[in-house]
Image (spheres, rainbow, N blue to C red):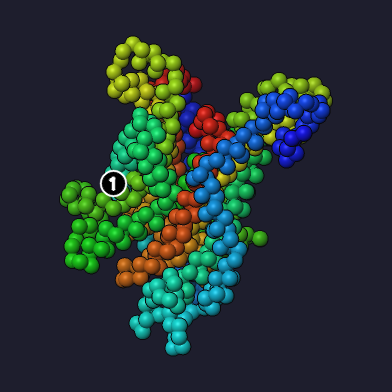
Amino acid sequence: MARFLIRRTLQGLFVLWLMTVTVFLIFFIGPGPGAVARTLAGRQATPAQVAAVSHRLLLDQPIYVQYQHFIWLLLHGNLGYDYYHSQSVNSIIAAAFPITLSLLIGASILWLTIGVLTGILSAVRTRSVYDRTSTVLALLFYSMPTFVLGFLLILGLYYEFAIHGVSVFPAPGTWVPFSENPAQWARALILPWITLALVSAATYTRLTRGSMLDVFGEDYIRTARSKGMSERRVIFKHNLRASLTPVVTQFGLDVGTLIGGAIITESVFNLPGLGYTAVQAIGQQDLPVVIGVVIVASAGVVIANVIVDIFYGVLDPRVRLN
Amino acid sequence: MTYNYSDLETVGELPAEPVLAAPEAEAAKKIEGRSPWRLAMDRLRHDRAAMIALGVIIIIVLVAIFAPVFALITGHGVYQQFRGPAPPIGLTPTGQPVGPTSAFLLGTDDQGRDILVRIAYGARVSLFVGVVATGITVGIGLIVGLAAGFFGGLTDSILARLMDWLLAIPFLLFAISLVSVVLVHPIGPIRPGLPVVIIVLGVLTWASVGRLVRGQVLSIREKEYIEAARALGAGPWRIMFIDILPNLLAQLIVYATLLIPLTIVGEASLSFLGVGVLPPTADWGQMISAASSVYLYGPWWYLLFPSVALLITTLAFNIFGDSVRDAFDPRGDLFV
């Protein structure tokens, strides 16, 4: 176990390092340094002023000098300062992260509940009307681009009410911290939660259904039934536990990916989470912010993968970590 | 003689004893072996949902091919802005889009352009990117997966690490970064717009295909018939492409069919985020993005119709892809 964790941590750090190098390269191949200095210096700036800005931000240094500087700060837990407002990237990420996390926690609870429950019902009542309906709905939401669903929800559930003077959901872009007012926090996030949850739940319905049906064919299920075990116990104790492995994998991957920001959902609902922040920063070629989000996002994926692997062992004792 | 020659062609072998008495011929026909491909095609043909989805896909393809016909019939060019004063008028006096009317069946957009015509042209972008980028993904994944699984050793270690790394990158974030760089600094043939979108969607996403192929190759490599081929003196290339590749085709086809809708959504997402296809090219994602800033003031049609077009397309491909998978794998133990 310890060896497994050490090896995976080292692999994860290597991936993170590769990621920072790649982002640096992309930035320097692209318009990055020049564009940033020119924008900051203003339209009327003389070349000397542009050069001065470049110098202040170290942008006139060779790429490896800047990379060294970045790594040096990073080793001290400092992600640097954004080019435009000299704001600390740590604080930018610290401000955006709770929003992404709030979105993720609510949505993941919703999608896991909806997905796994409908999956179980579908598997238990195969080929019933219920199963067919849920299969069709799952396919529909699986095919639904996130932004399409988001806008349709805004159109149908926010706009229609708003033009009749009823305010059920606040306008998109509203964000209330949980610590300030939990009820308002939830109210502002319901539509984004539903959007993210419905789009994701479909995968879980399909996974749970398929994997439960597979397990129902196993010998030990027949044994359990012939021992006179109640069907409920067979389903939840014997089948579900074995069926959850692919669900856990998917959940880990999804959460890992979304830690770096639910880019589309945040853009649709104007929620200034990590994804939204990253999109804005990319538009401005604001390298420190982009790298900061990329590090958080990649770390999310790497950590999620390790947790998934550990969970395998818990769910299925046959799996040995090495 | 009641041999059906078209059947024989797909089976690929001639009857050993062509002259049989009538009843014996009947019996021979009944037990005639059918290749897995044939069985899959038969199953697919009897799947009503699959056939409807295929019909929808064909219609979308036809719409894409004959998009100029829409422009011709309506008389509205894809870039033509109907700002008045000559009818038909595509913008209200306050500059707002016009809803569905007899002149503009699906209404106009914020530039006074015909949404119907633009949706038809948008189908070209979606399908083109969907098919070409998926082709690149599957092509690279196949080659890398084959090489990693077949050669093993150091090659495998390096390629497997590369795939791990690709799978760990936050795809959308990276795609946006890359595309935004190219938007200002074209790198050789990688120009802004379609080329960079196709390359990003094709090149960043092959790792999952590579992993799938690698896993399959690892198990196929140990089979007896590969050993037999080697004993007969077959070289590595022959074994890879003649002996192993055909066994991967069914899975690759299923994977590609299910990848196309994902790629189409990917393209629409990039365009939606403003880093995809360049305006004024008609594109569904871009139409939805442009509509998103105005639809709350009334022009719901601007948002709704491109969204529906996108949804129908991805849905049709997903239904068809699901059916293809079921057809190749009715017991559901090949693909998870």
For the N terminus of chain A, the image quarter is top left
**Residue A61: % across, % down:** 54, 57
Foreground: B141 or A310? B141
Q: Is residue B229 visible?
A: yes
- Check the image and report above or below for B183 versus A176: below
Foreground: B255 or B278? B255
Chain letter of disc 1 in the image:
A
What crowding class fits label 1: few (fewer than 14 Cα within 10 Å), some (14-19), or many (20 or more)? some
**Residue B51: % across, % down:** 54, 47
- Identify the residue position indicated by label 1 in the image: A102
Determine the residue positioned at 48% across, 37% down: A13
Determine the residue positioned at 56% across, 45% down: B257
**SS for callout 1:** helix
Foreground: B327 or A20? B327
Determine the residue positioned at 35% across, 29% down: A124
Amino acid type at mark 1: Ser
Where residue B151 sits, quadrant-wise, is top right
* Count of numbered badges drawn on the protein: 1
**Residue A141: % across, % down:** 39, 48
Q: Is residue A74 visible?
A: no
